[in-house]
Image (spheres, helix red, strand yellow):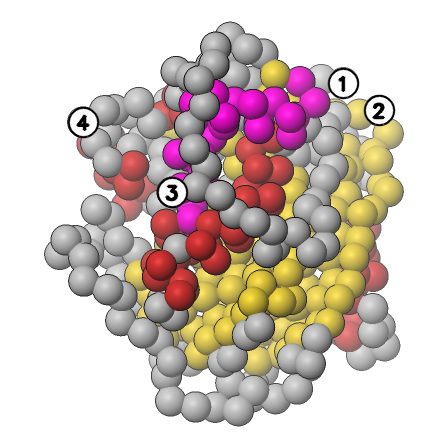
Amino acid sequence: MGVYLSTPRTEKLSDDGENDKLRYGLSSMQGWRSTMEDAHAAYLDLDVSTSFFGVYDGHGGKAVAKFCAKYLHQQVLKHEAYIAGDLGTSARKAFLRMDEMMSGQRGWRELARLGDKIDKFSGMLEGFIWSPRSGEANDQIDDWPSEEGPHSDFDGPTSGSTACVAIIRNNQLVVANAGDSRCVLCRKGQAFNLSKDHKPDLEIEKDRILKAGGFIQVGRVNGSLNLARAIGDVEFKQNKALPAEKQIVTANPDINIVELCDDDEFLVLACDGIWDCMSSQQVVDYVSEQLIAETKLSVICERVFDRCLAPTAGGEGCDNMTMILVQFKKPVTSVASVNQQPPSSPVTSVASVEQHPPSSPVTSVASVEH
């Protein structure tokens, strides 16, 4: 049946956790797809005051998604901007750092280890269901020194992954996104999208693609990739005259910064296997209904999968599904905005600042094309 199985795999990999401020539940299911290419990461205590949640939807294999689940949060922690309290800048740098780390001999070796199979000539990778072990967030982080070897000239994988992450520190929520996984906030029962689906037909994406020498055909970048931003996909990042942010496909994320308040109930991060089947508001309504009687958040994620799963192979409801549900355990006391100005930067032009309705929780949007 090609990319589909004759019978869906409905086994679910689930987990729950909580601290004094948050509860989370997560789950992943392979579904009708012949391989499972999603990955995820959840750390209630990235440090003493910060939580981190990430969903990574791989394409062309799972190794890039697994690489991000293992290393992206570590790079957020490591960046000097994080230490200075600028979570948005540290997240942006971490996204771009993934492509750098996956090149060269060491990148090739780690991708080969994370993937089931690797074709040494094309760099194509395949993987299986996986998430990082609890407690790995604060493992020793080295400087990722280069290595000499037969793949020292490896530019990076031709497979790729979306990345949608939420970082919560006190009353501040920072969402970084590249691709079409999505983060949605429930505020007083209303769904607010805190990320944008980066499809090639969006004007800002189309403009960058064309200027970098690419084209859009049947809604896909160069006729093949249905995403305009992703980590990996090195074949779309070969213009040596352009910085990473201006390549045909870029890992440069949109950054949204939100001040949480008493009205905020929960956060949903999920891959497009969910959003293809349900709107943001439909997911929020369903979760709200389930929370009346169900206390285990991972069970609610599992029920969303069962609701979305197609009865037969083909079309919507047949993709891999991954979802993280984060519930705010007690009211968040409103305080003055904790958004911090980013450090001085040579960047002086902002390509777009997204407009939100007055009721929107988004208080700061950084969408910068360098």
Q: Is residue 274 left or right of residue 232?
A: right
Q: Which residues are magenta?
A: 94-117
Could you tell which of marks 3 and 1 lies nearer the N-terminus? Answer: 1
Residue 95 in the magenta stretch? The answer is yes
- Give residue 1's mark: 1
In this orientation, which residue lies closer to the viewer: 318 or 143? 143
Label ID, residue 6: 2
Q: Quadrant of residue 239?
A: top left
Disc 2: CA contacts within 10 A as few (<14), some (14-19) or many (>=20): few
Asked if labels 4 and 3 touch by Cβ distance under 8 angstroms, the answer is no
Q: Can you tell which of label 3 and label 1 is closer to the viewer?
A: 3
Which tag, 1 or 4, sits closer to the chain's start? Answer: 1
Q: Is residue 157 above or below residue 72?
A: above
Pointer 4: what residue? 241
Residue 251, compared with residue 76, is above or below; it is above
What crowding class fits label 4: few (fewer than 14 Cα within 10 Å), some (14-19), or many (20 or more)? few
Confirm whether the magenta stretch covers residue 161: no
Where is residue 73 shown, x and y percent of the image?
A: 53, 53
Q: Split into 4 quadrants, where in the image is the N terminus?
A: top right
Question: Which is more N-terminal, label 2 or label 3?
Answer: 2
Q: Residue at x 60, y 51 (%)?
A: 139
